Amino acid sequence: MYETIISKVNEESLNKAREYILNGELVGFPTETVYGLGAIAYSDEAVKKIFEAKGRPQDNPLIVHVHKDYDVDKLVYVDYDYVYKLREAFLPGPLTMVYRSKGMISPVATCGLDTVGIRIPSSEAAQRFLRAVNVPVAAPSANVSKHTSPVTAMHVYEDLKGKIPLILDGGKCTGGIESTVLDVTTDTPIILRSGLVTADMIKSVVGKCGYSQNKPTDKIRAPGMKYRHYCPKCETALFKRNQVALAQKLYDEVKAKGQRPYFMCDDAMLSEIHGNVLRLGSTAEEIASNLYDKLHESEGLADMLIAFEVETGSDVDVGIMNRLSKACKKYE
Ligand code: AMP
Ligand code: MG
């Protein structure tokens, strides 16, 4: 058991973080997407602690984080020139590229795959942390496996208190959903997990971009995609936008039983429903940035969270719906 300390990002806490990471301990740290749970990526023992702390399935590989001046090509092979264009256009930022590994990263982090996902986060706090440690840091989101991803230091604390020594507090994450994971080991880059860097944005730079099918029988490319995930600790029901009457009926029934229902939806749906609402906002970027915060908020407020599918017309909807449809049970 640790006494888990939450500390603002400053010279003293960064020194501590550096010591912990280099000694094979775990540190929670902020990025522009969600909070990460980091360990030195060279060490099997250190990386194992991440899987233990989270209760994460052993076949779900971790992303490796480095600062923006780190020489990524020490760790990976670049097979296609479009990679340089993508780096120029989107890094640092919420884009993880999956390369062929040169084998320096712990096989515990890559789950024995011959590829490794590398991310260069853009947030200043993440950059300061990664620069302070100056080693590759393997990190998934800093939550207990399957729970809603953390976007504040308190979210991390609630899930991992006693299990890790230090959480760096960089305030609320602005992006809100995890990075886009892009396979760059093939002639056409393939999105393994959707995020804020969308297929259209990648196409505008590379000229082409595909989506992985993630059929249950596929060799696991982005294993995170196959599990139920991101779930708040209350009952949930996800409705299509044309099921307003059904959703309102459920709300009224839950309320009549003396329990607490809450709606969660984007602003375009607000005028159609009657009752308590967690508002996600109107633009896709706003909704992505609020999603996990509102899911966390629902835990204290609601016995039943009644969510509506999000549709703004933006390409970012794909990433939002990927999370929302795993976080909430489809209403049947
Ligand atoms: P999380 O750590 O929860 O943000 O999830 C990391 C995501 O990146 C998961 O969906 C992983 O499956 C994916 N990922 C990490 N490394 C690789 C890799 N080498 N190949 C494919 N997907 C990866
Ligand atoms: Mg996660």
Image (spheres, rainbow, N blue to C red):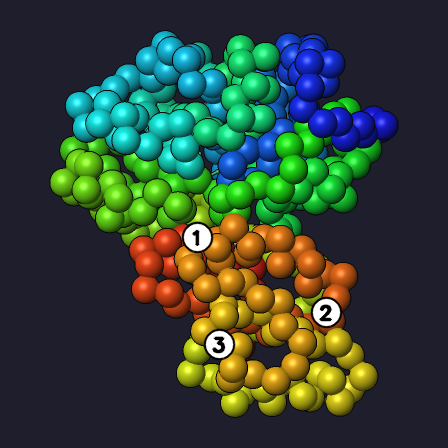
Q: Nearer the viewer, mark 2 or mark 3?
A: 3
Q: Which residue: 48% across, 76% down? A: 269
Q: Which residue is mark 2?
A: 302
Q: CA distance from mark 2 to mark 3?
A: 19 Å
Task: Give, as a three-letter code, the residue at label 1.
Answer: Glu
Q: Which residue: 14% across, 40% down? A: 207
Residue 269: which numbered mark, if any? Answer: 3
- Upstream in the sequence, badge 2 or badge 1? 1
- Upstream in the sequence, badge 2 or badge 3? 3
Residue 223 lies, in percent from the top left, at 44, 43
- In this orientation, which residue lies closer to the viewer: 55 or 134? 134
Q: Give the secondary structure at mark 3.
A: helix
Residues packed near mark 3 inside 10 Å, few (<14), some (14 to 19) or many (20 plus): some
Q: Which residue: 62% across, 59% down? A: 294
Q: Which residue is mark 1?
A: 285
Side of 267 relative to 16 (left or right): left
Q: Is residue 320 visible?
A: yes
- In this orientation, which residue lies closer to the viewer: 306 or 332? 306
